[in-house]
Image (cartoon, rainbow, N blue to C red):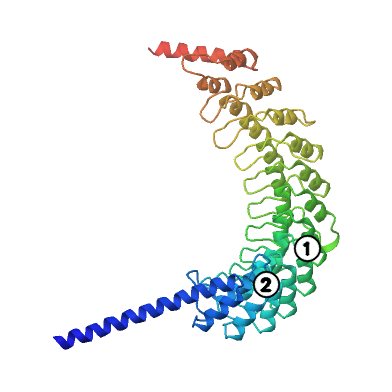
Amino acid sequence: MVHTAAVLAVLLASTAAAAAAAETEQSLATKLVAASHAQDYDAVVKLITVGAPINGIDKEGNNALMAAASTAGDPTKTKASSTLGVLELLLDKGADIEGASRKGYTALVWAARYGRVEAAEHLIKAGVDLDFKDNDGWNALSTAVHEGHYKIVQAIVDAGADIEAVENEGYTALMWAAEEGRLDIVGLLLSAGAKVDVQNKRGGSALMWAIYEKKTKAAALLVKAGANTNLHNEQGLTALLMAAGTGDVPSVKMFLKIKGKNRPNVNAADKSGSTPLHAACQNRHADVVQLLLRGGARTNVRDARGFSPLIVAALHENVRMTALLLATGNHDIDARGKMGNTALMTAAQEGHIDVVNALLAYKTAPGLEFVDKENGFSALSSAAYFENEETVKALVHAGASCITPTAQGWNAIELAESRAPEGKKAELVIWMKEHCLGSKELMKRAAEKRQAKKDEL
């Protein structure tokens, strides 16, 4: 029993000593990382002398070399004896140049992130792996590009890094440069031979990313380098479609000036059937609509809903776009969507009175008696049901009939009455009975129906 207790005591003492040693080692590692980050050369020397692990990590998973690389040359680090003193010392003492944090960041990545040019150049000369990737697939080049550190990008490219390396989603360095609109870096990468039409996992190219972020000058550089303007991403979008949808007038102008085989297809459609003209109308970009029409955009193309650009313009209440489309003179004003709705019916339902008036004033008057496939509603039926008073009056003045029944047999006046507050006759209903074509006949029929019900009783 005594012997067992003695053994247990020795084991406990040994465990405690090991724990204390580990704690001391961790404490020293943390202090070494902090001193390296502060560029405190003397403190780093003392810590290494007393046994601080050269490749130990702090609680965030960073080692001393990473810390030194991230602040080398930082003028706020007043204890720095020289720009690279601490970095050189750590490498001389055997610091792992490829050591990575828990997220996969190396010393070169930290230098690239914070723009530490001399540190990056020193690590490159020391033979660091230029293409090492972090957990997200980013390398030092993509990091430097994203942060806009031209000199570091140049150093890494000149050292032979793979400029076509992609991160986990398929983005290249050129894509990041284009997206950020970093013209100098875009030019550098193109000069180094970067492939201009690589697409990421979602089909996006460098040109598309430049357009997505409205970086027209970067896009122009890519086009000049031969970027294919007619590539589609996974949604079927082209760069021109993107520009039209965001109202990017400078980029649209740039695309429409392109001549020859690489001129973008102004009528290319995405997977929903939308063309650049649809996209511009949907997002109410009248200036882009005007440019596209001048550039040859077709006005009678239908999207997956069967909508023409005119129906889309009517839906999104833009009278200027409506006027531009009608002014082409070759538009089918009564083009119908898959549910049977025309531009007039769409505008009437939404209560877009200015669009309704523009359509009614067109040289070829729109059909007033078309009905949709779902409910059999005409333009007037929809306006009456949704209590769009101005629209109702405009349609009635244009000759719309109140007699046209819906699929359920309701006429426009009855629809308006159904929406009136209980026990109260709406002013719109009174007006319609006074002005609607056929209102007398309707009132006569309504009286006959009432009499028929009395007779049944």
Image coords of residue 18 (percent x, y): 36, 81
Q: Residues within 10 Å of mark 2 (few under 14, many from 20)?
A: many
Q: CA distance from mark 2 to mark 1?
A: 16 Å
Three-letter code for the amino acid on which mark 1 is drawn: Leu
**In this view, which residue lies farthest toward the bottom?**
3
**In this view, which residue lies farthest toward the left?**
1
Label 1: which residue?
183
- What residue is drawn where x is 73% and y is 27%? 357
Q: Is residue 57 visible?
A: no
Q: Residues within 10 Å of mark 1 (few under 14, many from 20)?
A: some
Label 2: which residue?
141
Vertical placement of residue 350 versus 134, above or below: above
Image coords of residue 395 (percent x, y): 67, 24
User: Front-most of 159 and 179?
Assistant: 159
Sequence order check, earlier mark of 2 and 1 = 2
Image coords of residue 431 (percent x, y): 62, 14
Q: Is residue 445 left or right of residue 196?
A: left
Three-letter code for the amino acid on which mark 2 is drawn: Leu
Q: Is residue 380 visible?
A: yes
Q: Is residue 156 left or right of residue 416?
A: right
- What residue is drawn where x is 78% and y is 43%? 287
User: Front-most of 18 and 128?
Assistant: 18
Q: Is residue 420 left or right of residue 146?
A: left
The mark tally for this picture is: 2
Vertical placement of residue 389 versus 355, above or below: above
Q: Secondary structure at mark 2?
A: helix
Quarter placement of the C terminus: top left
Image coords of residue 383 (percent x, y): 61, 27
- What residue is drawn where x is 77% and y is 75%? 193
Q: Secondary structure at mark 1?
A: helix
